[in-house]
């Protein structure tokens, strides 16, 4: 009983510390249908986990109390049990039922998260290419001809399709209040549909360790009305500088950057989801790629490639 009291006291103190410290789990503050699906699955799981914990603790307390050692049962010896098929079937079926109860909504949710919600399916989605690099997030708007770093502006009540890839190591893209996590991988593209149903600024980050700058690899999502989004696009084209190819490749080097905005996107030179993207007329510096995890210097003419670049399977054209 002393151990049980100690366990209950420890759990109570932990809950009190979390409450008094103002601990906020933003994953439960969903701001869109995709995040709400995830929240519902978490809540459903917590209900069953809580039920299991309550039942197990109740049985534990009952058995500890009922079968405790007492002066009047010092010589008690329980009868020998050869087995009970009914009980064995029950304790085999109970875990199977629990797994099914948790598995069915989880699988349904995984499929639902890959599609634009039905109530928004008739709208034209905003397509944004997301490129992760050490240690920054690059957002490209191909239709709007805009590129931002470490922040992304989206309209509310409109589906957004994020096309995810990486310019180097594998990372994980996560906006807790809007969607679940999805990996970004070089030479590959994954899609993440989201809808923000209320205006606000939402926190996003990388959740896959990728070196010393991992902790600060964060970004913000600014959800605004469609009118404000259109005004933001016009303002960017009126005041933001033009993105240059040389500047873009410089930014891919491992570094921390602030919030930046440009007219133009790197997609006009390279798409990291397509084995080097538009590299049919370019040769990547393989030593830079192996050493830094990004495509290094770009040679537009094969004749410009230094001789040592062609050694040991060096210079090669993109695919």
Image (cartoon, helix red, strand yellow):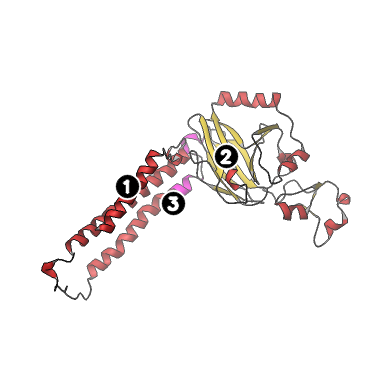
Q: Name the spot of residue 254 as percent of width and height, x first.
A: 69, 46
- Quadrant of the image occupied by residue 26: top left
Magenta residues span: 109-121
- Quadrant of the image occupied by residue 258: top right
Query: What element does badge 2 sit on?
Result: strand
Q: Name the spot of residue 111 as percent of width and height, x first.
A: 48, 48
Whether residue 102 is visible here, answered yes or no, is yes
Q: Are marks 1 and 2 in contact (CB under 8 Å)?
A: no
Question: Which of the two residues, 25 or 124, is positioned nearer the viewer here?
Answer: 25
Residue identifier under label 1: 12
Residue identifier under label 2: 161
Seen at 37% across and 47% down, the residue is: 14
Magenta region includes residue 112: yes
Q: Residues within 10 Å of mark 3 (few under 14, many from 20)?
A: few
Horizontal side, residue 92 vs residue 282: left or right:
left
- Disc 1 to disc 2, how far (Cα)? 43 Å
- Disc 2 to disc 3, how far (Cα)? 21 Å
Question: Which of the two residues, 177 or 260, is positioned nearer the viewer here?
Answer: 260
Seen at 38% across and 39% down, the residue is: 20
Foreground tag (1 vs 2): 1
* Picture disc at residue 107: 3
Query: What element does badge 3 sit on?
Result: helix
């Amino acid at each position: 009983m002393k151990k049980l009291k100690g366990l209950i006291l420890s759990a109570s103190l932990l809950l009190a510390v979390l409450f008094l410290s103002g601990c906020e789990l933003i994953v439960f503050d969903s701001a869109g249908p995709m995040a709400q699906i995830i929240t519902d699955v978490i809540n459903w799981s917590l209900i069953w986990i809580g039920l299991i914990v309550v039942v197990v603790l109740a049985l534990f307390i009952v058995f500890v109390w009922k079968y405790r050692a007492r002066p009047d049962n010092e010589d008690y010896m329980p009868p020998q049990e050869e087995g009970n098929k009914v009980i064995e079937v029950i304790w085999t079926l109970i875990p199977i039922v629990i797994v099914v109860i948790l598995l069915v909504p989880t699988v349904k949710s995984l499929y639902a998260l890959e599609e634009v919600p039905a109530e928004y399916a008739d709208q034209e989605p905003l397509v944004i290419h997301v490129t992760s690099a050490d240690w920054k997030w690059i957002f490209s708007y191909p239709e709007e001809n805009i590129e931002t770093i470490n922040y992304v502006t989206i309209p509310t009540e409109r589906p957004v399709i994020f096309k995810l890839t990486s310019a180097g190591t594998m990372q994980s893209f996560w906006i807790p209040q809007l969607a679940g996590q999805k990996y970004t991988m070089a030479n590959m593209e994954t899609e993440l549909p989201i809808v923000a149903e209320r205006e606000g600024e939402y926190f996003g980050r990388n959740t896959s360790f990728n070196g010393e700058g991992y902790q600060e690899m964060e970004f913000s999502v600014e959800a605004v009305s469609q009118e404000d989004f259109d005004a933001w696009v016009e303002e960017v084209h009126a005041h933001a500088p033009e993105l240059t190819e040389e500047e873009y490749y410089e930014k891919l080097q491992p570094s921390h950057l602030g919030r930046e905005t440009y007219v133009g996107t790197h997609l006009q030179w390279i798409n990291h989801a397509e084995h080097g993207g538009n590299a049919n007329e370019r040769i990547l510096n393989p030593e830079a790629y192996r050493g830094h995890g990004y495509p290094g210097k770009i040679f537009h003419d094969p004749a410009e490639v230094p001789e040592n670049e062609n050694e040991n399977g060096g210079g090669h054209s993109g695919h």
